[in-house]
Amino acid sequence: MKNQMKFVVLAMGVAFAAPAFANDASIVGAWSMTSLQFTDANGKVAEVPYSGQVIFSEGGTLSVQAMDANANAAPTTYTVNGYEAYYGPVEIDEAQKTFAITVESSLVRDLIGKRLVRKFEVTSNQLVILPADPSEGWRVTYERR
């Protein structure tokens, strides 16, 4: 009887823990940037000294903040003075490993209303985000918080 009770307790523990383990493959959560890489037209990969975070909420929103260590960084499509910040509703396609955000608010006002499609890879506590168009030549890696 004692062994049966141990088995029941163990089985219940595994059953309740299984959903938590299943979420390890989910993009939903808070992530801290560990690297940003750009590939130039000649195929040379360069590491850019960025820091930041991305948050995919369970409610279906995405929030991004990132900063170039160089305070004098030139503006880009996504940045002003080396800083990037935007958020909005996000559609995640776990099967296709893509997501699309419709930018609702952004530091770069030209992004507001745009739909940005990205590819992603999640492995345990690491997230890699890539552009849908590989010619954009960037790759961002995050670690789960």
Image: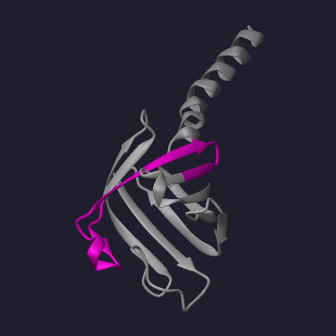
Question: Which quadrant does the C terminus fall into?
Answer: bottom right
Q: From what the image shows, is residue 63 above or below residue 13?
A: below
Q: Is residue 110 magenta?
A: yes
Q: Which is nearer the eye, 81 or 88?
A: 81
Quadrant of the rendered image containing residue 42: bottom right
Q: Which is nearer the eye, 123 or 13?
A: 123
The residue that appears at 47% across and 56% down in the rendered structure is: 135
Farthest residue toward the top?
Answer: 1
Q: Which is nearer the eye, 136 or 106?
A: 136
The residue that appears at 42% across and 44% down in the rendered structure is: 98
Farthest residue toward the front?
Answer: 42
Farthest residue toward the left?
Answer: 113
Across and down, in percent, residue 65 comes to 47, 72
The residue that appears at 57% across and 51% down in the rendered structure is: 128
How many numbered callouts?
0
The residue that appears at 57% across and 80% down in the rendered structure is: 68
Quadrant of the rendered image containing residue 7: top right
Q: From what the image shows, is residue 128 above or below residue 70?
A: above
Quadrant of the rendered image containing residue 139: bottom right
Q: From what the image shows, is residue 25 above or below residue 54?
A: above
**Region rendered in magenta:** 102-128
Across and down, in percent, residue 22 comes to 55, 33
Across and down, in percent, residue 69 comes to 62, 83
Q: Which is nearer the eye, 62 or 82?
A: 82
| Residue 144 in view of the camera | no
Across and down, in percent, residue 109 comes to 28, 78
Question: Which quadrant does the N terminus fall into?
Answer: top right
